[in-house]
Amino acid sequence: MFRPKIPTNPLPTGIVTPPAVIEPTTVIQHTPAPAPAPVAPAPTRPTVQLTPGALLAVIAGGTAVVLVVGAVLVSMLLAVAITAASVAVCALVARSLITADSKRR
């Protein structure tokens, strides 16, 4: 029951076909096609054009993102500060209880 059983490889039972013969092919040289006529390049323009209204919208969006990220970071800092203060108060109360209990005995 606890001995591993090693599988045996059965002998192939199907018909074995010989490998296919690959015949060499000849390479045919083509004459190169004539080069296409040069195309005049398009005039270069800046890809982003900001109108005054779009510029104000970008500034307002950036300001909103900075304010939201700042509020989230300040609230996280406040949560850490409140947690640290409550742990400190708990530590003081526990130390006070331990010292008061040892003085009574």
Image (cartoon, rainbow, N blue to C red):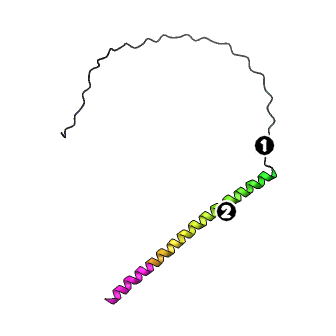
Name the image quarter holding residue 38. Answer: top right
Q: Which SS class for mark 2?
A: helix
Whether residue 94 appears in magenta in the rendering, the answer is: yes
Q: Horizontal and vertical percent for residue 100?
A: 38, 86
Return the disc, 1 or 2, that comes first in the chain's sequence: 1
Q: Horizontal and vertical percent for residue 78?
A: 57, 70
Residue at x 80%, y 38% (from the top left corner)? 44
For the image, the number of numbered tags is: 2
Residue at x 57%, y 68% (from the top left corner)? 77
Residue bearing mark 1: 46
Are discs 1 and 2 less than 8 Å apart at CB? no
Identify which residue, 99 or 30, lies in the foreground. Answer: 99
Check disc 2: other Cα within 10 Å, few if <14, some if 14-19, many if 20+: few
Distance from the alpha carbon under mark 1 to that under mark 2: 31 Å
Name the image quarter holding residue 28. Answer: top right
Q: Which residues are magenta?
A: 91-105
Check disc 1: other Cα within 10 Å, few if <14, some if 14-19, many if 20+: few
Please tell me whether mark 1 or mark 2 is closer to you in this view.
2
Q: Please determine whether, in this image, residue 74 is positioned above or below residue 33.
A: below
What's the amino acid at mark 2?
Leu
What's the amino acid at mark 1?
Pro
Residue bearing mark 2: 67
Residue at x 68%, y 13% (from the top left corner)? 31
Residue at x 42%, y 12% (from the top left corner)? 20
Q: Main secondary structure of the magenta part?
A: helix
Q: Please determine whether, in this image, residue 23 is positioned above or below residue 6.
A: above
Whether residue 16 appears in magenta in the rendering, the answer is: no
Q: Horizontal and vertical percent for residue 65?
A: 67, 58
